[in-house]
Amino acid sequence: MRQALALIVAVLILKDAAAGEAEKPKFEQYRAKLTGGRVHVRAGPGQNHTSLAVVQTGDTVFVVGVQGAWARIDAPEGCEVFIAKELVKLAGKSGTVTADHANIRAKPSEKGDIMGQVDKGASLEVLATEGKWLKIRPPKGITAWISAKYLEPPPPGATVEK
């Protein structure tokens, strides 16, 4: 009898938890304008992450998420990221991923921040070769981070101090 009661209580608790998650509003993606002069786009949410590019006041970015005081954005024009050369079949200035899943990194090193992954068969635009690495234009779906205080409007839910 105790086990049955405990099972019922556990099911009710899980049901309430699932209902709470389902009620969480989805982040509405949007375009925002830069307001802060020269602003670094980074590989992660914080100044300790690699700077990938610098954007200017008036530039626009596509905001896809938020974490604290940082906005996740589609990697903007000018960002350069890297993939291990051995995972790509080259054909001039383009390449095709040959591995099932390949990490896209912020630096030409296995220690570089992982920006995301691409799947086998993905097409890449190759900008340059750096040793065992290819510098590429960020593929679709690769995101970067920017301080939300430089965005107008700021992302909903961001902890922004102006």
Image: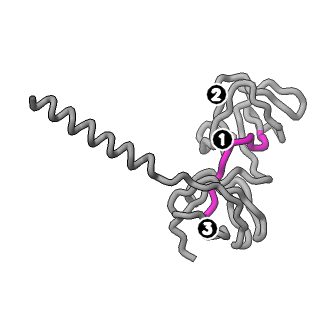
Decide if residue 59 is on the left or right side of residue 157.
right
Amino acid carrying label 1: it is Arg
Which mark sits nearer the N-terminus, 2 or 3? 2
Which mark sits nearer the N-terminus, 3 or 1? 1
Relative depth, front residue between 93 and 8? 8
Between marks 1 and 2, how big is the CA–CA gap? 13 Å
Name the residue beneath numbered marker 3.
154
Check disc 1: other Cα within 10 Å, few if <14, some if 14-19, many if 20+: many
- Mark 1: secondary structure: strand
Q: Position of residue 137 (x, y in %)?
A: 78, 43
At x 68%, y 62%, the residue is 40
Q: Quadrant of residue 147?
A: bottom right
Magenta residues, start to end = 135-149
At x 68%, y 33%, the residue is 118
At x 33%, y 41%, the residue is 15
Amino acid carrying label 3: it is Pro
Name the residue beneath numbered marker 1.
105
Task: Give the residue furthest to the right.
Answer: 92
